[in-house]
Image (cartoon, rainbow, N blue to C red):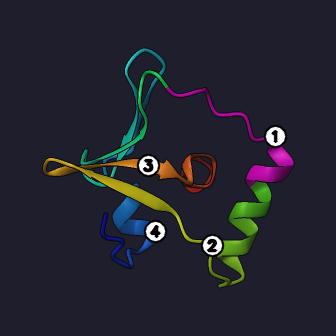
Amino acid sequence: MTIELKEFTIEEIVKGYADDSEEGVVAFGGKLDIRPKYQREFVYKDEQRDAVIDTIRKGFPLNVMYWVKNGDNYEVLDGQQRTISFC
């Protein structure tokens, strides 16, 4: 397994954001599967979600999030709650 650091802007990730309770959550122009059908639902409380947004507004980095390459697309391995929070 190879881990490769890539940096994206919030704007790039949010592009194409769609939340469908039946099909899951996608973003990044439809190429990022944030919450596949088999994953748990979004569980952050409002305070946790707001803390993620506040971190971004203050210009602080979010912790590393892990995506797994799946063909031409990606799936979130770690960072689902934070990604949905800022989307």
> Which circle, 3 or 2, is nearer the viewer?
3
Residue in front for this viewpoint, 44 or 16: 44
Q: How far is the residue under mark 1 from the one under mark 3?
A: 20 Å
- Name which residue lies at 48% across and 19% down: 21
Q: Looking at numbered disc 1 in the image, what kind of residue is underneath it?
A: Lys
Residue 76, numbered label: 3
Q: Looking at numbered disc 4 in the image, what kind of residue is underneath it?
A: Ile
The residue sitting at the front extreme is: 1
Among numbered discs 2 and 1, the one appearing first in the sequence: 1
Q: What is the number of callouts on the image? A: 4
| Residue at the disc numbered 2 | 62
At which x and y percent is residue 27?
35, 48
| Residue at the disc numbered 1 | 45
| Residue at the disc numbered 4 | 10
Q: Helix, strand, or loop for circle 3?
A: strand
User: Neighbour class for label 4 at 10 Å: few (<14), some, many (≥20)?
Assistant: few
Q: Is residue 60 a member of the stretch shown in magenta?
A: no
Magenta: main secondary structure equals loop
Quadrant hosting residue 63: bottom right
> Which circle, 2 or 1, is nearer the viewer?
2
Disc 4 and disc 2 in contact, CB within 8 angstroms: no
> Which circle, 1 or 3, is nearer the viewer?
3
